[in-house]
Amino acid sequence: MGSLFRSEEMALCQLFLQSESAYTCVSELGELGLVQFRDLNPDVNAFQRKFVNEVRRCDEMERKLRYLEREIRKDGIPVLDTGENPEAPMPREMIDLEATFEKLENELKEVNSNAEALKRNYLELTELKHILKKTQAFFDEAMYPPNLPYDQDVYFDDDERVNLLTDTTLHHLKHIGFVAGVILRERIPAFERMLWRACRGNVFLRQAIIEDPLEDPVTGEQVYKSVFIIFFQGDQLKMRVKKICEGFRATMYPCPEAPADRREMAMGVKTRLDDLNTVLSQTQDHRHRVLVSAARNIRAWMMKVWKIKSIYYTLNMFNLDVIQNGLIAECWIPVANLEDVQLALRRGTEKSGSLPAILNRLNTVEAPPTFHRTNKFTKAFQALIDSYGVATYREVNPAPYTIITFPFLFAVMFGDLGHGIIMALFGAWMVWREKPLSAKKTDNEIWNIFFGGRYIILLMGMFSMYTGLIYNDVFSKALNIFGSSWHGRYNESTLTSNKELTLDPGDPNMYDQVPYPFGLDPMWQISTNKINFYNSYKMKISIVFGIIHMMFGVILSVSNYKFFNKHSRIYCEFIPQVIFLCSLFGYLVLLVFHKWTWYGANGTVEVSPSCAPSILITFINMVLMKGYETPVEGDVCSPYMYGGQFGFQRFLVVLGVICVPWMLCAKPYLFYRNNKRKQLIMQANGGEGVIEEGGEVAAAPPGPPEESDMSEMMIHQGIHTIEYVLGSVSHTASYLRLWALSLAHAQLSEVLWSMVLSIGLRSGGEGGGGGIVMYFIFAAWASLTLAILVLMEGLSAFLHTLRLHWVEFQSKFYGGTGYPFVPFAFETILDQAENAIVET
């Protein structure tokens, strides 16, 4: 749990592995998932490393498995996922896996090639069958004119039918030839135009569509084709017609001239088609059996190949120890898990039967990676922080505090009990169905974002329900739980008939001065001056929450200074920052609470004015040092609030102004003073010692201080001071977005209710169609509520809350200049590989 507040302590270690045990040791470390290896060969390309051949073999096995998987999915065979996580096979098992995959691939390719050849033959015979059938109708039309009665549906019934080319009635068609074939249906118009233009109208084309689609043996798609027959005279036209057919990729088939020959050929085609159907069915059955057998093991095979490949990829990052016949590796390991790593190395050496591995801890000045242990609940909040920047090694982690502040600030802007219930139910459903939903891999990026932040959505919904009760706002309506403190002339008839209701807290006949037990009084929801009340109330609480949030961020910086032994920054930065923030903006919060406590609708007993002073005017006068120690007679709304107010305010302004040069000059002065002392130490001790940024003296590599150190220090401190002073003003104003978005959300909800749902409620009693009208209006209102008020407004509030944490809160203490700890873990590698498969 401690790593959640501050990253884990990391150690740079060196591993000495024997060549025989390197594979098994890395395999055990991959199962453990707590070691991040460093590449010791950064200048060596991937093709010159030791285990490049093994990686290529793994790539080849993965290619074969992907081919098998595509074929399995093409046939719609489900891939079994038993949840089994096989161990990485030993190197000698790679040969057996390669042989198995090679056999399956060759067998499947042979079956596919045979099936493709059979399908191509089947397609040709099917097209020839249609040609023989359709061309018979063409010949019938040539022999029997359309005005003579004859049966066109008779197919090869007249054995005495004469040849077209020798018929005495067609003696003028002597020496006419023809070509028959099939062509894609969409190419017919262009094909016909080309024939007409190229042959100058000296050919006769007849075509008929094939009603049933035909399967393309290569692509497997269904295509629609047409049968055509072209009559022509002469060899030149014959050659021209054939070239045009080839250009349009039309398939030509031999077609006998005599009806008896066509009938005999048709019978032969039918017999061959029946035989091909039988052979094709047997081929498909055999292919299906092969794929079903492979589907049972393909997931386990794929996981084994991924593990083998990742192991050899990691081994390529090691150095070769030629003398000791071993491998040398460097890695980052959490200090708390050094014993676990030792046990994993011991298991690896026992499997290989080799000498034990050696683990040495190294001293380094290099910044280690940042590692926060998270669970499924804290993982999403940590991802929000890491999106801004990974924490610097061992600095304070904002994630645990964000678990509370993030949903709360979101709820301040999204305060509605009804909308909060919708969001909380959605988050609770994703949490409840967590295991089955996570098992369904999908490439839908929006859904993956929602599901990854399910606990954030749940908390945002629950906090929105709480703030909705505080605001007493449920779909723009109020809950009357404890009764109202408003009474008098406002009875039930007045409330139902009066469209404009103004509440005056100063009227004792309307308000009995008893506060509502929890949240806001429901009467404010129906008053016409509620916007004035909500505007003042929400603006002030936004400033209060914002200053508290920023102050908490400044306080967290002390933990960093103490941990990194930079105590001078506490006196040079933290103390003046706190004094500056408290003297100006902290005092503003006190004024807000003072006004809430001592001022009512009719002023106070202690103060003579009849109206409460404006805090904004009071704060402006404070900065400009304007005001009087006693209230001015005749000034009805004087900024005077308590005795000695303006003297105390001048003191706070002066104190805040003093903090600016304090932050600007204290740290460079300490640096300059210790730099001089360091030079004396160097002269006395032969030139050893250095000054850290905060001014402390510490051991460091020898060498004189650079001349630019002091100038860089002053520039850095000047920028930091200006950023903090100006940022305190702009960041405080930035928290007003809590007020603005809260009012906007409430007003949008009210507009949607009054302009959509209220229409249906008013039409509910108008005849028998009122229920139908109400049904459609409610559907429209519910859809708009989900789309606009929950999704769009929720996304807007989420982004504004994210900005408040990244800029206004984390800028006070968070560096975010580290790099993440990415251990070698089979679990992560397998998840990434499976996600890549889903996306493709």
Image: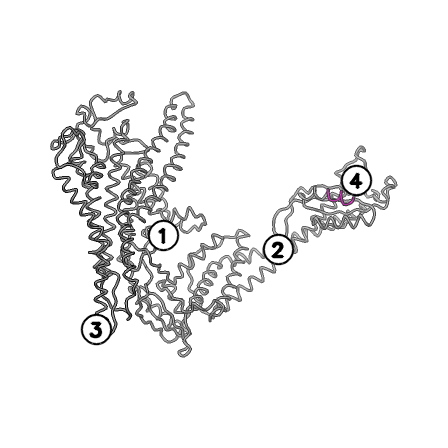
Horizontal side of residue 543 vs 827, given as left or right: left
Question: In this view of the protein, which residue sits in the foreground, 631 or 559?
Answer: 631
Q: Look at the picture and state if 16 lies above or below 662.
A: below
Q: Look at the picture and state if 26 lies above or below 474.
A: below
Q: Tell me, yes or no, whether the highlighted magenta stretch contains residue 73.
A: no
Query: Which circle's residue, 2 or 4, is located before the other in the chain?
Result: 4
- Residue at mark 4 to residue at mark 1: CA–CA distance: 78 Å
Query: Which circle's residue, 3 or 1, is located before the other in the chain?
Result: 1
The residue where tag 2 is placed is 282
The residue where tag 3 is placed is 684
- Whether residues under marks 3 and 2 lie with C-beta atoms below 8 angstroms apart, the answer is no
Q: Look at the image and give the residue range highlighted in magenta.
A: 193-199
Horizontal side of residue 255 vs 306, given as left or right: right
Q: Main secondary structure of the magenta part?
A: helix
Q: Can you give x and y, in whole percent of width and height, for residue 678 in the image? A: 23, 67
Residue at figure coordinates x 63%, y 56% from the top left? 115
Q: Secondary structure at mark 4?
A: helix
Question: In this view of the protein, which residue sits in the foreground, 209 or 559?
Answer: 559
